Image (cartoon, rainbow, N blue to C red):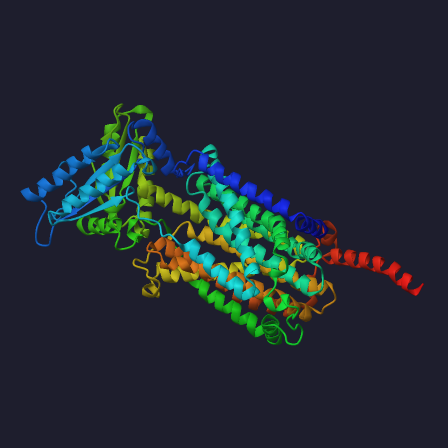
Amino acid sequence: MATFLYKLGRSSFRHRLLVVLSWVTLFVLAGLGVATATPPEPSSFSMPGTEAQRAFDLLDERFPGPAPDSASARLVFQAPEGRKLTGPAARTVIEKAAVELRQGSTQVASVADPFRAHTVSRDGTTAYATVTYKTGVASLTERTKDSLRHTAQSARHSGMAVEVGGSVLQPKEEQGSETIGLVIAAFVLLITFGSLVAAGLPLITAIFGVGVGVSTIGALAHTLDLGDTTPTLAMMLGLAVGIDYALFIVTRYRAELAEGHDREEAAGRALGTAGSAVVFAGLTVMIALAGLSVAGIPVLTKMGLAAAGTVALAVLVALTLLPALLGLAGKRIVGRRERKGRPKKRGSRPTAGARWAALVLRRPLPVLVAGVVGLGALAIPAASLELGLSDEGSLSADTTQRKAYDMLSVGFGPGHNGPLVLVVDAKDGGDVRSAAQRTVAAVHRVAGVAAVGPAAFNKSGDTATITVVPSSGPGSKQTEELVGKIRDTSADIKSATGDRVLVTGQTGMKVAFSKKMSDALLPYLALVVGLAFLLLMVVFRSVLVPLKAALGFLLSVGAALGAVVAVFQWGWAADLFGVDQPGPVMSTVPIFMVGIVFGLAMDYEVFLVTRIREAYVRGETPDGAVVAGFRHGARVVAAAAAIMTAVFGGFLGAGEQSVKLIGFGLAIAVVLDAFVVRMAIVPAVHALLGRTAWWLPQWLGRLLPDVDVEGEKLRRKLEGRRSETARPEAELVRG
């Protein structure tokens, strides 16, 4: 592989204008494709095989009208302190608001008047009108949304508090985090390279890769039913690995220039060595992303595969476009001092990375014990991990959705923000009314139920729905346990009468989703770690090095999850991180953390350890190889980790708690993996193992392909070619 990449690097460098024009053309075509394509539909949230999904499908089939996933809103009214909404004046305002909502848009399917729908609190201080629309949120016009806003604002003039909950007026997403991340990345790269051109190349190539990838996803989204959230993970991870891969190759290219090679030769050698590491790092990330399909949730599978495709593009960009840009950059790829013929003094004093490695090598056991014990202690809270999905209670306190949520919790109880829906299907088309009555009576007796609404029947009279209000909030552990109790009751009803009772609704779907994600986490972890172990065994031709890489990752991700639980679930240092309401961790966070952090961790491992192995196969002692590897690789890993920490840490300033949680989890995971596992535990383990670190059974060595990731075969081949060229010249001189 190293020889092939060497030739590819030289070819891309030599034909740089053609390569750059080809990528620019592809970038433009992808942009035109997404601009002219049919916009994607909102991501369909389905969980095949779950009870909640079967009930959802049954509702869709037997209750014609607005789809179960149609948009809805709640207009929540709260009387001024000391007054009630049941008076004539307040009642007139509320009824007028209901009329305005009905007449304000043709997209409104129905409006439930609070006084007719009995949605006025017992103390008369709070009421809400439910607005149901004919279509999903994405299809609602601005005129429809403006009508809702105007109605709320008009009602506020009466002196009562009026807020809007539901999915219609989604809070505006925090913008600028990507831009801030790129600015921070540019600053770190400038410090690392000391050249504006060298600092700019990783950013340019990352933007190209992400631009082509995300545009392609957008162009194909409608055709392949990818949904509008599919590009999210692709953009986040594509930008991260794109910068990492280019950073590694540019660093190696500058090192080859410093060795005295001409620019084309340096590009070929950089790709033949660093490019091999990039290929295998990319493969491990793609394995992790494709593995998201084990959850069995279509939207996650699509997100994972789309992100894997974007990572593949990032690898291709690094292997082709980057060498071409290096050719166009000329001598400006190095600092001004070196361009003026005054190269930096090398070898006079060791680099910070080499000094740190030497320090660890002097005390490997204490460093190893401190690192493992520290990460293990941080991971302890992860044993208490509780999963849930975010709701309006996790939004910023100044949003109208959060205010409506809090008003409903105070006026009706927290369960009103997330009622459950039971679907009753009588046995063999029997008497569904009797079945519904039996179900209502049985569910009334279940602990944790605050209220059970009357059954509603479809036109054909063969199916009923029953609304159940929990006494706890939609994201709480108690509500999850209540769903389990109701399902046990439903099983008893079915065994006694044959009637089928299914639990669904938004809260029921969220509980099912959280359970499915929880069940998938360990199999997903085993899959990605296992496959990556096999791949890294091929890369490093060792059994213990991949084992160390996998165990180190488990330590870092476990510690990061422990920190997430401590802050966002238990509430430790909640004020410091702006956590308003500690509670269950959003159920998508652990599996996304595993996928994203695994990808970055394997980048750092491959970048660092390939340098160590390269020095080892060239004759360095085990300790000398570690120092040499850190001399060349530590700065790259530190820069890459600093960039990602700053990017992810920027999300801590978001107003939505779920966004803060993701940013905190990823930032702390990157810090722990890069600076504790890779920078401390890795050299300590290599120091203790010595030559044993590279042990590989002979029979296994014969089975594994030799991919020459460190480029040793390429180096010998090039040196042999140079000596053959030099021999005739020497003979000519002697003659």
Any part of residue 595 in sight: no
Q: Position of residue 226 (x, y in %)?
A: 45, 38
Location of the C terminus by quadrant is: bottom right
Instruction: Point out residue 161 in the picture as x, y percentages from the top left corner.
Output: 16, 50
Report whether 62 appears left or right of 518.
left
Residue sitting at x 44%, y 41%: 299
- The residue at the point 32 percent across, 38 percent down is 137
Residue drawn at (66%, 49%), measured in percent from left and top?
Answer: 12
> Residue 325 location in percent, x, y?
60, 52
Q: Is residue 21 above or below residue 245?
A: above
Q: Of 488 and 377, which appears nearest the observer?
A: 377
Q: Is residue 368 above or below residue 392?
A: below
Q: Against 59, is 125 above or below? A: below
Question: Is residue 94 in view?
Answer: yes
- Where residue 39 sits, quadrant-wise, is top left
Q: Which residue ends up furthest to the front in the rendered image?
A: 340
Residue occupying the far left of the picture:
88
> 418 or 735: nearer the eye?
735
- Left-right relation of 356 to 4: left
User: How many discs appear?
Assistant: 0
In percent of width and height, residue 206 lies at: 53, 52
Q: Quadrant of residue 358?
A: bottom right
- Name the side, left or right, on which 263 lies relative to 442: right
What residue is shown at x 58% (from left), y 55% (from top)? 246
Image-based side of 430 in relation to 299, left or right: left
